[in-house]
Image: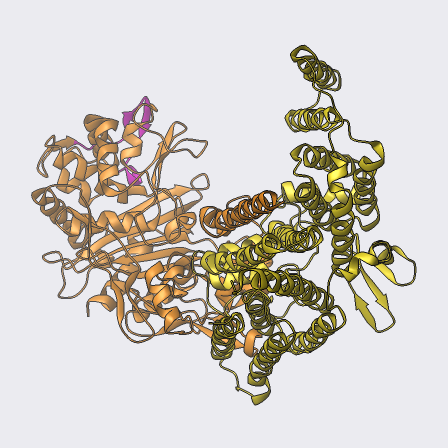
Chain colours: A orange, B yellow
Amino acid sequence: MNRQIVQLFGLSMILFATLIAFTSRWTVFEADALKDPNDRRGQANKRELIAQQQIPRGLIKTADGTVVARSLPRGRGEERVFTRTYPEAGLFAHAVGYSFIQRGSAGIEQSRNDALVGEENEFGTIFSELQSEEREGSDVISTLDTSAQKTAAQALGGQTGSVVAIEPQTGRVKVMVSLPEYDPNQIPDRFGPLASDEAQPLFNRATQSSYPPGSTFKVVTAAAALDSGKFTPDSVVDGSSPRTISGAPLANSGGANFGPITLTEALTNSVNTVWAQVGEQIGPKTLLEYMNRFGFNRDPELDYPDGQMLASGVRNAKGDLVDDTGGFDIGRVAIGQGGEEGTTLVSPLQMALVACAVGNGGELMRPRLTERIVGKDGRVDERLQPVEQSQVMKRETAEQLAGMMSNVVNEGTGTAAALEGIDVAGKTGTAEVDNATSNQAWFIGFAPVQNPRMAVAVTIERTQGQGGTEAAPIAKQVLQELLQ
Amino acid sequence: MSARSRELMGLIPVSLLVSAGFAAVLTTRAQEVSDATLSYGLVFLGLCLAGHFFIRARLPDADPYLYPLAALLAAFGLVMIYRINAELAREQAQWFVVGLVVFCATVVFLRDHHALERYRYTIASLGIALLVMPRLPGIGAPVNGAYLGVKLGPISFQPAEFAKIAIIVFLASYLRDTGDVLVQSRSTPRSAGQQALLFAIPAVLVVLVVLVLGLGTAGTVLLAVFTASLVAVLRERPSVKHFGPLLLVWGLAMLMLLFIRDLGSSLMFFGGFLALLYVATGRLSLVGVGATMFLGGATFFANSVSHVKERVDVWLDPFAPRVVQDEGYQIAQSLYAQADGGLFGQGFGQALLQIPGGGPLLPAAHTDLIYAVITDELGLFGATGLILVYLMFAARGFKTALVAGDGFSKLLAAGLTAVLALQVFVIVGGVTKTIPLTGVTLPFVSYGGSSIVANMMLLALLLIVSDHARKDRGSVQGGLV
């Protein structure tokens, strides 16, 4: 009998080893899948959501210290949960977003969730567990500027549109306004009506929109033309109107007939026929190459949820991005228009980045909404440093282009953006929409020209005015606020 | 050092665990440390010491490790239950008092476990009666489709916990008598040709059946093992008279599946039976026949009884969107809780058990799923530690069987140990999705009066056997092991 008893013990060991094997399967090997809401196995797992509700989320503040998101406790003991409140209501709605267990999260609340709930690396977690500290989220200090944000929102004055302002030398996003806004405090109760509202208040026009850029896109075309060495600011091109571009006549604004003029003059007066010819001469390959350098054709490299950003670029009638084999009308794409095969469509964020690259000597800095992350003990967990995204063009090209753009504000279509005592460089744009019954008005620019500290992009949806009359004055106010 | 002093030493880790555990839970809660809550720990330690002094007086030669190991498990359970629900911990502590009283009573009234042999048929009938009780109208009611509980007025209990002891006592006694006869070879030597035919003909038959019925891999393996085992058994031409009990117990297990509708407890009983059968006869072929018949029967029921089938489907895929919020909820939540634990766990008192403002996140956390809570809070390391404590308990139980002097004692100790180990496998296996989840308790750890009292009784029997065995050996060898 003893042999069998020993064997029975052996069997027990095997059975218990199986149990340990299965326990390690769930605790270690498949643990990530079980916690992943996108995995079939983790779909029904609400533990992380519940746990996060029980953690006091960190504050979100603007660069000047204004609290824009905080957590308030409700209930006591194990029943205690925290809910989010947004003291500034709609002012920062799109940039900051929201976080509610019922509706998930958006904006910085989503992209900086790990920091806000105090997620640390494995070692840090064990360490704080040993100290048996309550889990607490870190504060996120954003790059946004409260007063400039207010100025921009007020300047838009209820019109549908967007303003984005970025420091060209650092990539700090100082203003991100999208109107109409929504009050994030209402997300739990009024999500349905907000989502179905025709004015689309939940839609972040600064990052998700695809607007025709109009003549502001000529800055991109000019950068490609100058930097590729095919043109100089003094190259002369015939600016008569109309001219046949891709088999169809193209006219200048107001039918103005210019004759042979330099590229500088052609940018100052936004001469369509000149820039369409320039586009045809540099070709789609070169233009797309420069667009890529500016960051087109992919989501902007902003610390913001991917789902809330849209790539700018040339899109066909189906809405897909096209490459240089698409056979699009290069002349019209080069002036911010297009046709069935491809038309230029951009977001205000992307156009602000175009202004940034020109303003920073051709070096495009990666844009960011986060300045630093501060732990509850006041220790700075992380301070974000300026990072170069790409060298879009040579420094000389950028300087030439900056000169051409300052002419636009000094004597061209953008005079309404001029500031007293500070040189401003810019470019206006007016794209006809809704069968030419209304306009998409634009202004992009930066200042001061000699040492640009701020770049801006302003756009207004469905206005009867022009970029120079509607968007440029708003840019002026925002630049003034940020540069004073 | 004497055995009893070693036992006393063994209680030191228990006291450490109780103090550390309660302290950790209380610190985590950061609530007012009331004297009442701390006194649980002290009362529990007092009970442990009382038990120790009782054993010192009545069972001086018993195995010194079984009792501290059981106390360790119970302490562990008490801390976990306290952490889940302080009120339940108070009740559990009360059940410990009852369990200890039953433990002492068993030792006092049953000085010699051989006395049980005289009442083997009474005990067997009692065991079967206990198993049938939950199906009796008025006192039994199904929980999650399984008939495991009985409610007699204000008292509710799980008869299966006690039935397992009764059945093991009966089987140990029965197989002691018939084990040898069961396999007594009556065969005459055969020629090589006859031997070959004996295996060849069934082999051909198996292939034919597999082809005709179109069995899958599992079915084919099952049939092949069954046939091979059966041939091996039949080679020895056992008398049907003695072969009968095997069929009888198999039938009983199948009836249990039908009656109790609980795969887990059926597996526990039948597994315990097979273990004893193997120890008694040393014939793997018998186990092969029994195991394949059980699996075959279980598979048949799995496909025909909707409740069992559902359990199996949920076991195979608890994450299917159709079941994950319903029948699969418990096992899915169990796995999520374990995933949260990781290697080292979240710490005592840190596991998420409640939906804030809602119901429990983890159903039956204090009974069925207590292992998942342990894994959540103490991680893979803590869970492995717990399993190792059970393994040590099993080691001491089987050791008791090894040193026992007579067949009945050996079978009794081995059987009780095996059924306890199987119970651990059934519930932990269920919680970890190794096998379908069923509602048996984790011995000494889960909340539940029946579980505590029955397992204390089981411990008493093991210690009585051990005391006798080691006393005999001691007197023969003139010293203590």
> Is residue B122 shown left or right of residue A229?
right
Q: Residue A135 or B224: which is nearer the viewer? A: B224
> Is residue B372 shown left or right of residue A425?
right
Taking the spot 19% from the left edge, 66% from the top edge, the residue there is A483
Magenta span contains residue A10: no
Q: How many labels does the image show?
A: 0
Q: Residue A2 or A338: which is nearer the viewer? A: A2
The x and y percentages for residue A473 are 28, 60
Q: Residue B386 or B418: which is nearer the viewer? A: B418
Residue stretch in magenta: A238-256
For the view shown, which residue lies furthest in the top direction?
A: B193
Above or below B323: residue B350: below
Above or below A42: residue B47: below
The x and y percentages for residue B426 are 65, 50
Q: In which quarter of the image is the N terminus of chain A?
A: top right
Magenta span contains residue A243: yes
Q: Residue A331 or B369: which is nearer the viewer? A: B369
- The answer to whether residue B142 is seen in the rendering is no
Taking the spot 23% from the left edge, 58% from the top edge, the residue there is A417
- The answer to whether residue B274 is seen in the rendering is yes
For the view shown, which residue lies furthest in the right direction?
A: B137
The x and y percentages for residue A338 are 35, 32
Residue B169, picture quadrant: bottom right
> Is residue B310 shown left or right of residue A42?
right
Q: In which quarter of the image is the C terminus of chain A?
A: bottom left
